[in-house]
Image: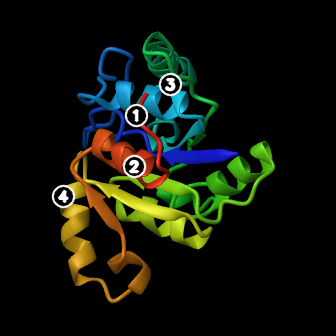
Amino acid sequence: MKLVILDRDGVINEDSDQYIRSVEEWIPLEGSIDAIARLHRAGYTVVVATNQSGLGRGLFDLDALEQMHAKFVSLVEEAGGAIAGIFYCPHTPEDQCQCRKPAPGLLDAIAREFGCDLHDVPFIGDSLKDLEVGLKRGCIPILVRTGKGMSTEAKLLLSSDAGLQSVRVFDNLSAAIDFLLDQAGEKSP
């Protein structure tokens, strides 16, 4: 199975320091939906791993989150793609759970669900937490400059961690997916 893991806010859709709280606030970044559809049409299984502490903070409820995800899945399907799963952590940092990135619980759940090892699976994110959790499970971490990506890129330059220093950086999800498809020798469908 060819699997790719994506973070949500700042990678697929616009991000906000005030949290994305409603389906109206869930706005896809330019090109992200088509990029996901291209990846799916090239034979990849696409899953999302996202921290959603707004749930635990009481900023929105499960119905609102499900509406956001239904909008996302519908847009991807309309573009000819599919999302195989959305894995989210509802906890706040104070909960000290094992699923909030950079803890590996979400990735472990993905590995169990799909019966696969995540070694060398691309994980595309915009934050240091995304890159760190990917490295913990042997993923290939990829950074996009959208969302928090530009400030994360600055942190990479200061890092002494060899894994973080070798992270590939792209302007957006579409460029990252173009790279993955090119590396695999596949034309973008």
Q: Position of residue 27 (x, y in %)?
A: 29, 23
Indicate which label's residue lies in the foreground, 2 or 4.
2
Which residue is found at the position 49% from the left and 55% from the top?
A: 123
- Crowding at mark 1 (Cα within 10 Å: few <14, some 14-19, many 20+): some
Label 4 SS: helix
Q: Looking at the image, can residue 10 be seen?
A: no
Compute the Cα span from label 1 to label 3: 31 Å
Q: Is residue 121 visible?
A: yes
Residue 185 in the figure: left or right of residue 16? right
* Image quadrant where residue 129 sits: bottom left
In the image, is 114 to the left or to the right of 59?
right
On the image, numbered disc 1 is attached to which residue? 188
Farthest residue to the bottom: give it. Answer: 160
Amino acid type at circle 4 is: Met
Q: Check disc 1 and report its element: helix, strand or loop.
A: loop
Who comes first in sequence, dot 1 or dot 2?
2
